[in-house]
Image (cartoon, rainbow, N blue to C red):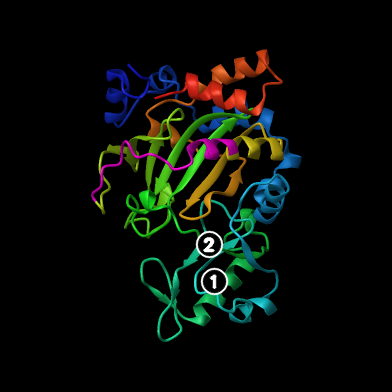
């Protein structure tokens, strides 16, 4: 019987409240443990800039041969913010995001334009040119950035998700989060948009967290606001047994992100484009903990075996790390 499907595991996820002792017994990692045991010892502060600034992350990814969404423009001043429409000739679809944003805040997806020239969001809502410029101005002012500091706006390719993913998401583009320790994939989940999340793959705004089997790349279970469910609340499809296209490539990208940043504990976000395949979207030095709910497994049960494996084999290679995780953390 697998770790994610045992009666004990099912009992855990169908109970809403657990005592601290019960959480520890099930290997659930909280923020304090994450920070003290895994994040602070393995993530030197000097390396945070490589991932907190998406422009730096994309440049680094390019140097290491990783595919990323094409950057159309970088807007650094209000002068160019006012002229954003002139910087995007012929670009009907694009994404605008803050370079130093977090949690999906400030990300604006444009799918095209209507007959009157308005910009259309995935929901069909229209934005005027003035509203678009206002959004960019807010990004530059630091409204969405870490620490509220002034920021730059990135205008980039709008990922067109593989059909298997659009079928299980409401309007927005799903993404995959892989949590890593010492270059070993620890846990993965798909984040799929709902009507409640307004087409955004953000769990705190109501998106779904869907656990993925590291060994096969197939979805195994799903949660919405921490509660288990089997079907998408809006589109009605079954959320389990769905194969992620290019799964081995996705794990390869995640391991490369650890190698290129030098961070020991991190989360890697990847999207699967229908024509370009897996694309690295961003790297997070402080990955959240909801992935445990999506997989029905406490992170501690996977983090500690990797700590021991890394101590025994500090020079393990790229392929060895993936093989270890797929063997020992299969659902």
Residue that carries the numbered disc 2 in the rendered image:
106
Total marks shown come to 2
**Which residue is situated farthest in the right direction here?**
46
**Local crowd size for mark 2, using a 10 Å CA cut-off: few (<14), some (14–19), many (≥20):** many
Q: Is residue 120 visible?
A: yes
Q: What residue range appears in magenta?
A: 236-252
- From this view, report whether residue 21 is shown above or below residue 290: above
Mark 1 = which residue? 135
Quarter of the image with the N terminus in it: top left
Q: Is residue 2 left or right of residue 58?
A: left
Quarter of the image holding residue 35?
A: top right
**Element class at badge 2:** loop
Is 286 placed left or right of 63 in the picture? Answer: left
Disc 1 crowd, CA 10 A, few/some/many (<14, 14-19, 20+): many
**Residue that sits furthest to the front in the current view:** 275
Q: Is residue 296 magenta?
A: no
Nearer to the camera, 148 or 301? 301
Identify the residue shown where x is 44% and y is 69%: 111
- Quadrant for the C terminus, please: top left
Q: Are marks 2 and 1 in contact (CB under 8 Å)?
A: yes
Residue 245 on the magenta segment: yes
Where is residue 61 shown, x and y percent of the image?
A: 68, 48
Q: Find residue 104 and report its horizontal and vertical position in percent.
A: 51, 54
Q: Residue 320, image x and y in percent?
A: 61, 23
Residue 98: quarter of image: bottom right
């Amino acid at each position: 019987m697998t770790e994610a499907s045992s009666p004990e595991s099912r009992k855990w996820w169908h109970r809403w409240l657990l005592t601290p002792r019960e959480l520890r017994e099930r290997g659930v990692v909280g923020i304090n443990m994450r920070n003290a045991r895994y994040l602070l010892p393995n993530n030197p502060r000097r390396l945070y800039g490589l991932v907190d600034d998406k422009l730096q992350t994309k440049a680094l990814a390019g140097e290491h041969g990783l595919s990323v969404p094409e950057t159309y423009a970088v807007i650094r001043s209000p002068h160019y913010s006012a002229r954003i429409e002139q910087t995007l000739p012929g670009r009907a679809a694009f994404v605008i995001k803050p370079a130093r944003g977090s949690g999906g805040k400030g990300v604006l997806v444009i799918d095209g334009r209507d007959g009157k020239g308005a910009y259309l969001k995935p929901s069909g809502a229209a934005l005027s040119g003035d509203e678009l410029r206002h959004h960019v101005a807010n990004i530059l002012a630091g409204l969405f950035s870490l620490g509220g500091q002034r920021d730059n706006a990135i205008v980039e390719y709008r990922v067109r998700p593989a059909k298997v993913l659009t079928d299980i998401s409401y309007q927005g583009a799903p993404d995959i989060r892989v949590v890593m320790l010492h270059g070993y994939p620890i846990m993965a989940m798909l984040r799929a948009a709902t009507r409640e999340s307004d087409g955004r793959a953000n769990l705190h705004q109501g998106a779904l967290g869907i656990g993925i089997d590291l060994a096969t790349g197939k979805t195994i279970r799903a949660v919405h606001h921490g509660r288990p469910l089997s079907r998408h609340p809006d589109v009605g499809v079954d959320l389990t047994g769905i194969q992620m296209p290019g799964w081995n490539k996705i794990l390869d990208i995640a391991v490369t992100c650890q190698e290129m940043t030098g961070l020991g504990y991190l989360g890697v976000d990847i999207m699967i484009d229908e024509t370009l395949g897996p694309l690295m979207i961003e790297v997070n030095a402080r990955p959240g903990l909801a992935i445990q709910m999506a997989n029905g497994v406490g992170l501690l049960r996977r983090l500690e075996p990797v700590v021991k494996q890394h101590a025994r084999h500090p020079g393990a290679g790229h392929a060895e790390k993936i093989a270890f995780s797929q063997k020992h953390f299969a659902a």
